[in-house]
Each structure stands twice: as structure tokens, then as C-alpha cells.
Amino acid sequence: MITVEHLTKRFGDFLAVNDVSFDVSAGEIFAFLGPNGAGKTTTIRTMVTLLSPSSGRITIDGLDLAGHQDQIRKRIGIVFQDPSLDQNLTAWENMDLHGALYGVPRRLRRERAELLLRAFELWESRREVVLQFSGGMRRRLEIARGLLHTPRILFLDEPTLGLDPQTRNQLWTQLKQLNQSEGVTVFLTTHYMDEAENCDRIAIIDHGKIVAIDTPENLKASVGKDRVQIRTADDQTAIAELKERFELEAAIHEGMVTFNVESGEQFVPRLFEGLSQQIKAVSVSRPSLDDVFMSYTGKTIRDAEATVGDRNRAHVMAFRRGR
């Protein structure tokens, strides 16, 4: 359904997307997982024809992006990070207007609007002005609207950003039901690990490059080891002793000395015997997608977001000095 080959996108001397290649099968829920600023939104905006690639090739539903942009736009639905609803219209009016703009016949768009509003539990609120909606209701309405013209592919850019966990789970339940009942292919970007768990496959992206692609289960299995985090009286000394005495590479992540080791719970007693520094706190966790991200990039996704933020600020300052 989607094929991307050697996609590159530059903004001046800034390389936002760096030689990215992947494919998405029909009916699949596929995610780009990475920190803010890693190139996720730039990639998705290029695929939906809002940006032109610097180089590379994109095929959507068998159509080459370079010569069939109008046909592609009719086959896709898009939900952006930023709100795009008309807040002065009702939920029903937003749906009806979207259908009219896409040329959906009146009878069909009303049937689709009712079906989708009911699926996303918004039918009872259809006559309410969107301005009165909660954030979760607005997000559900945006996704319902994006599906009204029966797209072959639904693109979601950070679909649950800013929503509370309960609302996020509710939205995902409804989205997966629509994915199964309508067979729509879903491509989304996210930096939430638990959200990525809902997907059939994940591409981990960092600094504009894909570093791994597989199912969540296979990615976690590729790490294999448990994640151990400790806080000591002198973390730098503890890092040096872990390398010297246990041949373990450790680093400070999220304020704690972090490393991976097999059978973490059995290893912890050895830490208390082998380290000269007092251990003030310790935690052990099974491999997670955050561990996968750290395994492939050398940092957690939170650390990566801080690094990317610094890099982007430096790029903006350099751009301003050059003007």
C-alpha cells in the first residue's frame, strides 16, 4: 500500500529525513516511533503531498507520488498534530462539509457520518458546537472525519498528543475496530511507547534515519536483556566499576545509572557486593520498546528529545545568523 525508497528531505543545509526506505502492507497499522524532531512529521507530510522530497521515490496505493498527487489525495485521510476542525460548526456540520469537499454524494456522506459518529461515540453530541467539545472528543471527531470519504490509507500524526491515558486507550480501541471492519491501512507517528504497542509493525526513527523495523514483539526480543537502573552516592564511579568489575557498559539515563544484563533480578545482589558505592535505589524491568530504542540509538527517547531540541535550536540560531 505504501512504498518509500531512499527518501531524503533537506531544508537548506539541514537534513531532516536521511535516506529512508520502508513499505506498508494493505490493512496494516504501521508506526514511526521516535522523539520529537526525529523526522517523523516531515516524512508524513511528504507522503501526503504537502512537501516535495529532495530525492527518493514514494508510491501510494500503486501511484507514484511524483505524477499522481491529485489521485493520491482522494485515496488518503489525514489527521494532523494541530487541530483542523471548524470550532464554530457542529460535529455533524464538520463531517458534512468534509464529505462535500471530497465530492461524496449527499446520501452516502450522511450514511458514513452517522456510522462513524456512532463508532467514535459522538452521535449523541452531533448537534453540539465543536467549541464545547473536550480535547478527546475533538480528536475522535477529527479521526472520524478523516475516514468519511472511505480512504484507502489513514495518516495520523501524533494522534493522541496531549490526551490523558484513558482517552488514548478509548481512541485506540475505536481505531482498531475501524481498521478491522473497514480494512483501512493506518500509518501513524508517535513518541509514546505504549501507543506503539498497538501497531502491527514499528519503524524506529532517530535523527532522520530508520534504525530498526519489525513487530513490537520481535524488536523487544532482539534486546533480550533486562534493563537495570540504579542510583548511587557517586554515579560516575559506579559506571567505571560496572565496566571494570562486570564488563558492563552503563550510562546516565533519566537521572539513573542504566545498563542491560541477562537475568536482572538475579544480578542485583552481585551489585551490592561488587560496587564500592552505596546503592540508594534500584529497579529492574523486562525489555520494553524504550529499551529497544536505547539499544539501537544509545539513549532513551526522553534523552533523544532533549538532544534533538538542542540541535534544532542551534540550527534555528545558525539560520537566523545567516539571513
Image (cartoon, helix red, strand yellow):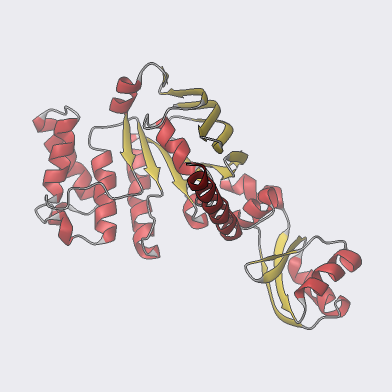
Which residue ends up furthest to the top in the rendered image? 67
Nearer to the camera, 110 or 304: 304
* Residue 114 x %, y %: 15, 43
Left or right of 80 in this view: 105: left
Left or right of 272 in this view: 230: left
Nearer to the camera, 176 or 319: 319
Relative to residue 99, is residue 56 depicted above or below?
Answer: above
Relative to residue 12, is residue 246 depicted above or below?
Answer: below
Picture residue at 60% right of the left edge, 39% below the top: 209
* Residue 151 x %, y %: 30, 31
How many marks are shown on the rendered structure? 0
Picture residue at 24% right of the left edge, 57% below the top: 137
Is residue 20 visible to us here?
yes
Relative to residue 296, is residue 59 depicted above or below?
Answer: above
* Residue 48 x %, y %: 38, 32
Picture residue at 38% right of the left edge, 54% below the top: 160
- State the quadrant of the N terminus: top left
Left or right of 271 in this view: 110: left
Is residue 34 visible to us here?
no
Q: Quadrant of residue 236?
A: bottom right
Nearer to the camera, 81 or 123: 81
Picture residue at 29% right of the left edge, 58% below the top: 136
* Residue 115 x %, y %: 19, 42
